[in-house]
Image (cartoon, coloured by chain):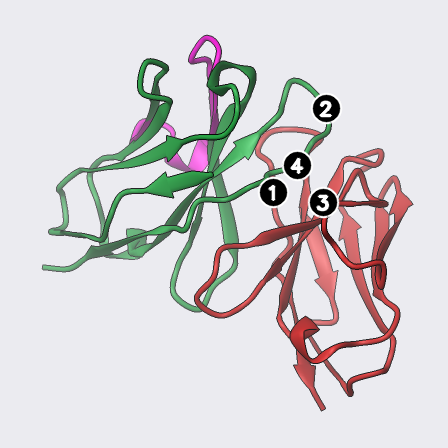
Chain colours: A red, B green
Amino acid sequence: ETVLTQSPVTLSLSPGERATLSCRASQSISTYLAWYQQKPGQAPRLLIFDASNRAPGVPGRFSGSGSGTDFTLTISSLEPEDFALYYCQQLTDWPRTFGQGTKLEIK
Amino acid sequence: QLVQSGVEVKKPGASVKISCKTSGYTFRSYALSWVRQAPGQGLEWMGWINGYNGDTKYSQKFQGRVIMTIDASTKTGFLELRSLRSDDTAIYYCARDPYPYSPRWLDPWGQGTLVSVSP
């Protein structure tokens, strides 16, 4: 089973700042990594697929990078609505594991 | 769009069956994945079912307790979980899954179904 480790667990930033979230895989997953955003009381929402492709409708301030075992989600300039939970998921092998999540909170 | 069935309250040892009614796409061209989230916890992938032929892949954690099925005539997927325990209390989500085709993602997601297991 591929274990995904996200860091940091909590990230405290202010609107307008740049956010960098990390996801590390226990073995190579090529670029089969997705990022999701989840707000309280809502279902997760797809942001990034195949490590670096923005899903339709996702603002341009969100970008993803990485391959193999190390991946990054970057939010270039935080908007108030970006403060939420973020999860990565690998879609290379079974089971399709998720990281434990990073909480992005307002400083 | 994926619309799930409503809240379920069950006793330990019982079974629950959740539905996920799809619309707006060709049902047989996509799979469904099921993911759950315990209160205050992260996302946990449970399994996958092919919308074309009903093939399944289950997380080892749930093997023997979970059954995923589809009804192509109503474009609906089902998740049945047996021998419920208190730690099965969670929100259960279905999500459209293009695998084995590309791209690899889960999108969109259903609104979630709360299953509460309590004596």
Question: Which residue is painted at 69% across and 72% down in the image?
Answer: A82
* Pointer 4 residue: B105
Q: Which residues are magenta?
A: B48-67
Q: Circle 3: is it few (<14), some (14-19), or many (20+) Cα within 10 Å?
A: many
Quick check: do tags 1 and 3 share a chain?
yes
Q: Amino acid at mark 4?
A: Trp
Rendered image: mark on residue A46: none
Instruction: Give coordinates of residue B38: x percent, y percent.
Output: 39, 59
Tag 1 subunit: A
Quick check: do tags 4 and 1 share a chain?
no
Q: CA distance from mark 1 to mark 2?
A: 18 Å
Left or right: A38 in relation to B4: right
Rendered image: mark on residue A34: 3
Could you say which is closer to the camera, residue A54 or residue A32?
Answer: A54
Tag 4 subunit: B
Give the structural element (helix, strand or loop) at label 2. Answer: loop
Quarter of the figure with residue A76: bottom right
Quick check: do tags 1 and 2 share a chain?
no
Quarter of the figure with residue A94: top right
Are the residues at dot 4 and dot 3 in contact (C-beta closer than 8 Å)?
yes
Instruction: Give coordinates of residue B81: x percent, y percent.
Output: 27, 36
Are the residues at dot 1 and dot 2 in contact (C-beta closer than 8 Å)?
no
Could you say which is closer to the camera, residue B22 or residue A37?
Answer: B22
Q: CA distance from mark 4 to mark 3?
A: 6 Å
Instruction: Give coordinates of residue A92: x percent, y percent.
Output: 71, 30
Give the structural element (helix, strand or loop) at label 1. Answer: loop
Rendered image: mark on residue B102: 2
Rendered image: mark on residue A97: 1
